Amino acid sequence: MSQDLQLLGRAKRTHDGYLREIRKLACYYNTAPDQLTQQQIAEYLLHLINDRDFAPGSLKVTCSALKFFYGTTCPRDWEVLKKIDCCLFPSAR
């Protein structure tokens, strides 16, 4: 993921933030992120929203990191990633 971020010219702050969010996901499940399922990603997001009461800005960073990882680094064609667009990024409709 780090190399993908560098190759695509992402800012250091973006790079650090995305890596941090994917590390937190991996720690939550104690599993490598490329081994997680679509259902686990959805449950993690719901955990952040309902249990951790994440602020919209923080949630946007997490969702952006997930979309980058599962869209670029470890591509998955998952409905949950499309739902992130609809629910959290209204301008993407």
Image: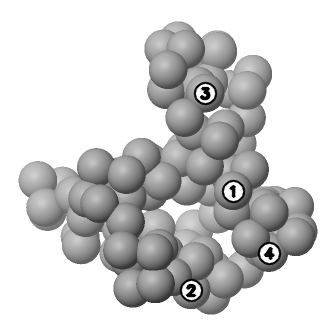
Q: Using a 10 Å C-alpha cutoff, classify the residue at mark 2 as few (fewer than 14 neighbours), some (14 to 19) or many (20 or more).
A: few
Q: Earlier in the sequence, mark 3 or mark 4?
A: 3
Front position in the image: 93 or 27: 27
- Between the C-alphas of marks 2 and 3, the distance is 24 Å
Residue at 55% in and 55% down: 66
The three-letter amino acid code for the residue at tag 1 is Lys
**Dot 2 corresponds to which residue?**
43
The three-letter amino acid code for the residue at tag 4 is Tyr
Name the front one of labels 1 and 2: 1
Residue at 26% in and 59% down: 56
Front position in the image: 71 or 90: 90
Q: Earlier in the sequence, mark 4 or mark 1?
A: 1
**Dot 3 corresponds to which residue?**
16
Secondary structure under the numbered disc 1 in the rendered image: helix
- Between the C-alphas of marks 3 and 4, the distance is 20 Å
Residue 31: percent from the left, percent from the top? 88, 68
